[in-house]
Amino acid sequence: MAVPGCSHDKVSLQARLARIEGQVRGIQRMVDEDRYCIDVLTQVTAVKAALDKVALALLDDHVSRCVVDAVREGAGEQKVKELTAAISRYLG
């Protein structure tokens, strides 16, 4: 079985997360500057959407690597349960 990891495309995930970090700092600045609340909420929505994309990339990677490998090795049931629990927490 492959070694568990974050993603086969770690660089892409790191870049996305760095952009999200910058967006969050921007939101902090907007709050500090007493910007219009709807504008701040718009930026919060953008950050949530960006985080959703990261989560979906991680789930896709997990299914295509970890779950598929586990199924091939006869241990798929446990990985599917783990996946279902992770999705449930994410939707939470």
Image (cartoon, rainbow, N blue to C red):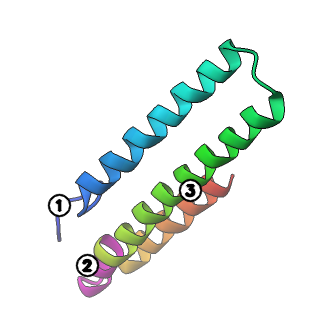
Give the vertical position of 70 relative to 12 (above or below).
below
In-image side of 64 versus 10 (left or right):
right
Q: Residue at x 48, y 41 (%)?
A: 20
Q: Residue at x 48, y 66 (%)?
A: 83
**Distance between the alpha carbons at the discs numbered 2 and 1:** 10 Å
- Point out which mark residue 69 bears: 2
Residue 12: percent from left, percent from top: 30, 56
Looking at the picture, tell me which residue is in the foreground, 72 or 64: 64
Q: Quadrant of the N terminus?
A: bottom left
Residue type pointed to by label 1: Val
- Residue range in magenta is 66-75
Looking at the picture, tell me which residue is in the foreground, 60 or 77: 60
In-image side of 3 versus 7 (left or right):
left
What main secondary structure does the magenta stretch of the protein show? helix
Looking at the picture, tell me which residue is in the foreground, 55 or 38: 38
Q: Earlier in the sequence, mark 1 or mark 3?
A: 1
Residue 7: percent from left, percent from top: 28, 59
Q: Confirm whether residue 75 shows in the render.
A: no
**Distance between the alpha carbons at the discs numbered 2 and 3:** 25 Å
Q: Residue at x 45, y 34 (%)?
A: 21
Residue type pointed to by label 3: Asp
Which residue bears the numbered disc 3?
Answer: 52
Residue 17: percent from left, percent from top: 40, 43
Q: Residue at x 56, y 56 (%)?
A: 52
In-image side of 92 versus 11 (left or right):
right
Which residue bears the numbered disc 1?
Answer: 3
**Distance between the alpha carbons at the discs numbered 1 and 3:** 25 Å
- Disc 2 vs disc 3: which is toward the camera? 3
Residue 73: percent from left, percent from top: 23, 82
Residue type pointed to by label 2: Asp
Q: Confirm whether residue 4 shows in the render.
A: yes
